Image (cartoon, grey):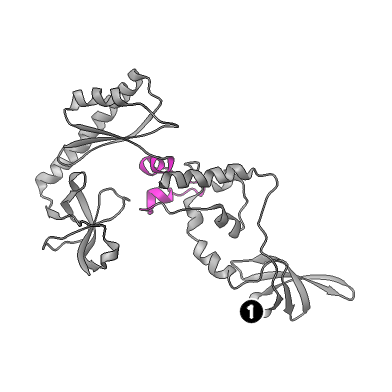
Amino acid sequence: MQEIVGVKFKKLGKIYFFNPNGLSFQKGQNVIVETARGIEYGEVAIVNGKVSEERIVAPLKNVIRIATEEDTKTFLENEKKSEEAFKVCEEKISSHGLDMKLIDVEYTFDNSKLLFYFTSDGRVDFRELVKDLASVYKTRIELRQIGVRDEVKMLGGYGMCGRELCCCNHLSDLNPVSIKMAKEQGLSLNPSKISGVCGRLMCCLKHEQAVYEEKLSRLPTAGSVVKTPEGTGTVEEVEVLKEEVKVKISKEDGIMRKAFKASEIEVIKSGRRKERYDPDVDMKELKALEEGFKMEEL
């Protein structure tokens, strides 16, 4: 086991482990840490604790010190300078005629590097842009192309539910989302209804997936032959969250359809789980939403 402290550098950014270096911390405390890109100003998200070696990405960097008032002043000044650099970079992009959209600009705490985040539909030759920016700021310039999910996470917004986007409110990591989740949750496979502001599959599909998977493992599938208090019949529909099944039972006087609690029935023969498919939906478009996310993960 290794003693660590968890630090994040953005409100909903990923939490990184650092060696506390003999210091004790409180949650929300600002600290100066050593990172792969230089000295950085961060916030304690996880207080001193111990984790297994498997969870640590070696080598474990050190916390240098608890941030002082002067450190906080430097951090705030860097944010102001970043805003000015944003305007300058936009003008440079326009003058060079580059097909790219600037999203964010960030100074490292020690001013050793200036990072520009942008989106673009393809590859961009920004070598001349870098030279121009380096001549203005006299420091190391780095341009990073990000995906549409990261763009929305940085800019913020609201979803079709009317609430703040999950990636801007509570998600520190963007977990993989698949079309299979939408199918198992009985959602309409219409790209406009299951894609978010970013144009990719909605992150919230992941939230309830564990519940659906657990319930589906216990419920019969459509087409299963089951024994009910009213007789033997065939499952026509499954209400996953209610844990109810709609069964068609043949009677002497006709067909009866009735809903039963899963606890009231006994499966005699399991049916095959059918893929939920809407013939009016272009599956290639749905796959593109999923593949677009996977590409960003890389």
Does any portion of residue 280 appear in the rendered image? yes
Q: Position of residue 167 (x, y in %)?
A: 40, 49
Query: Does 100 sit above or below residue 240?
Result: above
Quarter of the image with the N terminus in it: bottom left
Does any portion of residue 158 appear in the rendered image? no
The three-letter amino acid code for the residue at tag 1 is Ser
Query: Residue shown at 13%/42% (left/top)?
Result: 73
Q: Farthest residue in the right direction? A: 253
Pointer 1: residues within 10 angstroms few (<14), some, or many (20+)?
few
Is 152 in the magenta? yes
Tell me where residue 218 sits by quadrant. bottom right
Q: Nearer the viewer, residue 65 or 178?
A: 178
Tell me where residue 6 sits by quadrant. bottom left
Q: Position of residue 135 (x, y in %)?
A: 19, 23
Q: Position of residue 104 (x, y in %)?
A: 31, 36
Q: Position of residue 21 (x, y in %)?
A: 12, 60
Query: Residue shown at 62%/45% (left/top)?
Result: 283
Query: Does 214 sit above or below residue 264?
Result: above
Residue under label 1, please give it: 263
Q: Secondary structure at mark 1?
A: helix
Span colored in magenta: 148-173
Q: Nearer the viewer, residue 60 or 203?
A: 60
Q: Left or right of 22: which side holds 91?
A: right
